[in-house]
Image (cartoon, helix red, strand yellow):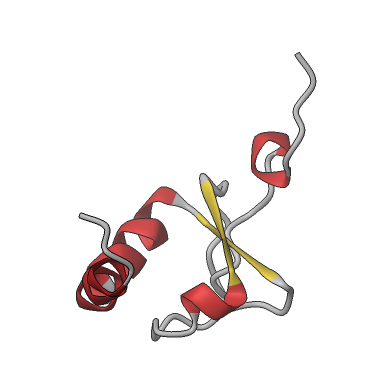
Amino acid sequence: MMALGKVQKGVICSVIDCNNEAIRSLGRDKFSASDLKLKEGRRVYLCEHHYKVWKKETKKMRELDRLRYGQK
């Protein structure tokens, strides 16, 4: 099967000084609440470690967004 997205093709994490392979991608606007320093680009690609850091930093904000739109 042919890889369709950049993550499947093996793009590198967008955090400066990180050379790990990305497992997730996010839009830059969704990522703006984090303190991590990023390389330029429209999308943010995160390795497993930095994805966990992002999730911890933005947990409260994401919970409020879900409540605002009526999702659990």
Q: Residue at x 68, y 40 (%)?
A: 10
The total of numbered circles placed on residues is 0
Res 33 quadrant in image = bottom left
Q: Nearer the viewer, residue 3 or 13?
A: 3
- Point out residue 8 in the picture as x, y percentages from the top left corner: 66, 35
The spot of residue 58 in percent (x, y) is 29, 74
Q: Where is residue 15 shown, x and y percent of the image?
A: 54, 71
Residue at 75% across, 28% down = 3
Toward which corner of the image does residue 42 lie, by quadrant? bottom right
- Residue 24's x, y, as percent? 52, 50
* Residue sitting at the far front: 70
Quadrant location of the N terminus? top right
Instruction: Work out whether 65 lies above or below 18.
Output: below
Dividing the picture into quadrants, the one containing residue 64 is: bottom left
Q: Up-down: is 27 above or below 52?
A: below
37 vs 22: above or below: below
Pick whichever, 59 or 69, lies toward us: 69
Left or right placement of residue 12 versus residue 4 in this view? left
In percent of the image, x 69 and y 49: which residue is there? Answer: 11
